[in-house]
Amino acid sequence: MSTTTFSHEFNYETFKGKVSFPTGIFIDGQFSAGSDNTTIDVINPSTGKVVTSIAEGTAKDVDRAAAAAKRAFETSWGLKIPGARRGELLYKLADLIEQHSDELAALEALDNGKTFNLAKGLDLGMSVGTIRYYGGWADKIHGQVIETHEGNLSYTRHEPIGVVGQIIPWNFPLLMMAWKIGPALATGNCIVLKPSEFTPLTALRVCSLINEAGFPPGVVNVVTGYGEIAGRAISEHLGIDKVAFTGSTLVGRKVMEAAARSNLKNVTLELGGKSPNIVFNDADLDLAINWSSHGIYFNHGQCCCASSRIFVQSGIYDEFLKRFTAKSQTLKLGDPFGSDSHQGPQVSQIQFDRIMGYINSGKEQGAKVHLGGERHGTEGYWIQPTIFTDARPDMRIVQEEIFGPVCVIIKFENEEDVLRQANDSLYGLAAAVFTKDITRGIQFAHSLHAGTAWINCTNSLYPNVPFGGFKQSGIGRELGEYALNNYTNVKAVQVNLGVRI
Amino acid sequence: MANVVELSVPKSNSKIRVQTGLFINNDFVPSVDNIEPIRVYNPSTEEELCTVTAASAKDVDIAVAAARKAFRETWGKNVSGFERSRLINKLADLMERDKQTLAELECLNNGKPVKIARDFDIGDSIGCLRYYAGWADKILGQSIEIDHKTKIAITHPEPVGVCGQIIPWNYPIQMWAWKVAPALAVGCTIVMKPSEITPLTALKLSELVKEAGFPPGVINTIPSLGSVGGLALAAHRGVDKVAFTGSTVTGRKVMEAAANSNLKKVSLELGGKSPQLVFASADIEQAANWAALGILYNTGQDCTAGSRLYVQDNIYDKFVATLAAKAKELVIGDGFDERSGGGPVVSKTQYDRVWSYIESGKKQGARVIVGGERRTTPGYWVDATIFTDIRPDMKIVEEEIFGPVLSVGKFHTEQEAIDLANDTTYGLAAGLHSTDQAQCHRVSSALEAGTIWINQYNVLYNNVPFGGKKQSGVGRELGSHALDEYISTKAVHWNYGENIEWPL
């Protein structure tokens, strides 16, 4: 088993330091090459250049990982270990991630393109908080005792499912790992996790921390690889009892199909969105502008819950558009390690091309580019904050998820009409409404077909508040107590205390 | 100026520093009243260890005011569950760091062996803090359907407020942890009165509270006589809730004082006279081990002590002989001696009490088959003592002794065993030993106690609730249930769309 080491020197005002850690396919606590000895290039989206290459995991590696996970589940994890001990290890891992915050933030900025400051402040903070949150649940997985009659003792156990596959995206690499492993480990499952092939570095760094924290080997296994190969292998694996996927709706379908065709494994999905943001005439305009900007430009628009359709009531439309445009122009595009950069590059060439493709389609279908609409710079994948107006509901930029710093601003007059338009989507991940009239805010929140409804804010998440989609935005909920349901199998136990038949 | 004492640790060169003032607003301060200080003794040697400041009723006022201010300004709704979780975990880390010192201090003051204090009392206490740290950001209310057009109802689980907590001397550190952890997790502030017999570890833990970073006034520690500080807390109009662990006699006084003052919420963990039942199908060797543990652990100074034992008649002789041999194996001795499995009883008062029960048992005609003889060396020693040939009306059978004194009786039928077990005003715990599963369920269902142990005894877990039925208590500690004792639910009915007509 050979291991490779990734070493990199960072020399920026925001972060100076050398990082060095083993990479490879992480199975049973050890790093190795992939079964075919092939590799995947890791590209820095700020430069478009290869930073390193990492092992490519194949179906054979997934087999090996699933076997290791199964062995660990039957011997050193699952119900072989008390919840309090699982919690202790999760807390230890959270502490280690926190101690290595700078290093992990730097890796994230290098690999994903988000700014170092954002990675450190948000991604790291919430990752640590999420793992700690689930550490606290580990010894609190209660079943019920249910009264039937005196000759029968009935109770439920919330058992871990067993070996779970987790496929995570590239937009918040470390954070998505935390959201996945937290509840799965707290409830006693063993994991085969596939990070995105675009952004594997922080997941690989965390593998060493998992060893250091003291998790038994095989409890968490990480197989870096391509979606169509390693991801597919996980989805169809007969030895994996559940798959959790976050990514596009298109791929989510394939995961669910593969699960259905193979062993009908339990499936939870966090997919795309085209979330509406409705700004009423009576909104606090400054509040609305700032949150709306956050709603679409946060993380360079690479956010499943991005508020990408902004509906503005006619009474304030002109003022909103003017101020929102001005706000958009203040966002500084720059190097992820720049101390005042707000927006780095999009994550990859493919994403860059996709987003530019949508921008072109908007132009071709007759929408107006009110701001931006072009590449920024000549190196790396920066795209200017882009505002479309005068769009029609049937346009692709209105219907399809762009996943970039591109929004459509749509004028509306009538409440019923905007509610209908907002809900007129195959997606249903999130929605936002800005108004000072709390009655209207609550009524809208209750009427919007979305898993999260924000009143007077956007993109606000907490580890203990559930998150997930209606309709084709997903199945199941992450975060909060609700996530535990994704990783437990309810067993009802009935003890017959003397009923003879 | 408040004082610091240095206590020598036997068999070592180390010393333990203890601040002996009142801990209020994160500072150790003198009393404003200068009443007689509390004398603290080492029960293994009968020697005085030191004195600590005794809180007067005026000091209690000051502590309560500090807790109220913290509740209003820096704790309560001013701190997130995430932050409470972090601080409680930090406190657990510090206890882990200092566990040897804390164990030695506990042994000096309470007498229990150092290794038991460290690995069990303190180990479980650290687990308790971590358990409740995990709850702090998971205190959930409900959103409740009214109609979907004009109203919503939500419940907010609010912290009840300033809590007076009065803890006993048998598990000073562990009782401290059981009390502070859920209260802090929910967001309450605390005025803690440790037992006047064993105040030292609570004072030492107060240093860790400050080091962990809790804002001033969140926890205040005021050693005091029960009749002074305890009563003052129970009667205080500025205290929203009192939690008391101790005797049933004192528990009544706490509840009366609460009722007469401001009807503050009350939870009580009181005494017990818990029975163990050994049925014919039981594994005799194991049942004898558990029975021995049940009455001898912590030298019988346990509210759940299995102090009555009823054995099915057809295995009686064999079982009792087995148990008697095991009881004699326990080494009760100095807590700093590695061989000791138990220490002295905690004080002269307790020593006199337990011995008077032993004398009464003899006088009322019960037969001593193990122990019953006093030692002649200094220290409050009571060795394992077993009485047989008991009658239900004997004092040793009816009343809580709180020492390593067991009363053993006999039964014929299962129903007789249940009746004997339930024939008490207490209802804290009970144990049954049987390999007949239906019997286990029937009997556990019939026993009137808050904790039933089947084929074990005296084993508790931080995530399983604990408390008494009947006169053994009100409310539950441990598990998620303890949180309810510190939560005051507010229901918010939010009308956002109904206009009513007037007159109706």
Image (cartoon, coloured by chain):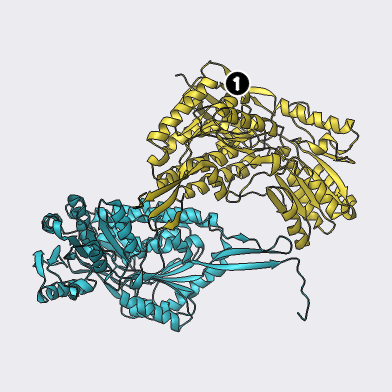
For the point 21% across and 54% down, the residue is B287
Element type at marker 1?
Answer: strand
Q: Is residue A110 visible?
A: no
Residue at the front extreme? A501
In the rendered view, does A406 fall on the left or right side of B194? right
> Label 1: which residue?
A40
Measured along the vertical axis of the image, is residue A383 above or below residue A481? above
Q: Residue at x 38, y 58 (%)?
A: A150
- The answer to whether residue A204 is above or below residue A121 is above
Provide residue A36's location: percent of width, then percent of height: 53, 15
The image quadrant where one finds the N terminus of chain A is top left
Toward the bottom, the furthest residue is B260
Q: Residue A363, position in %: x, y? A: 88, 32
The answer to which quarter of the image holds residue B426 is bottom left
Hue used for the chain lettered B: cyan
State the residue at coordinates (15%, 62%).
B384
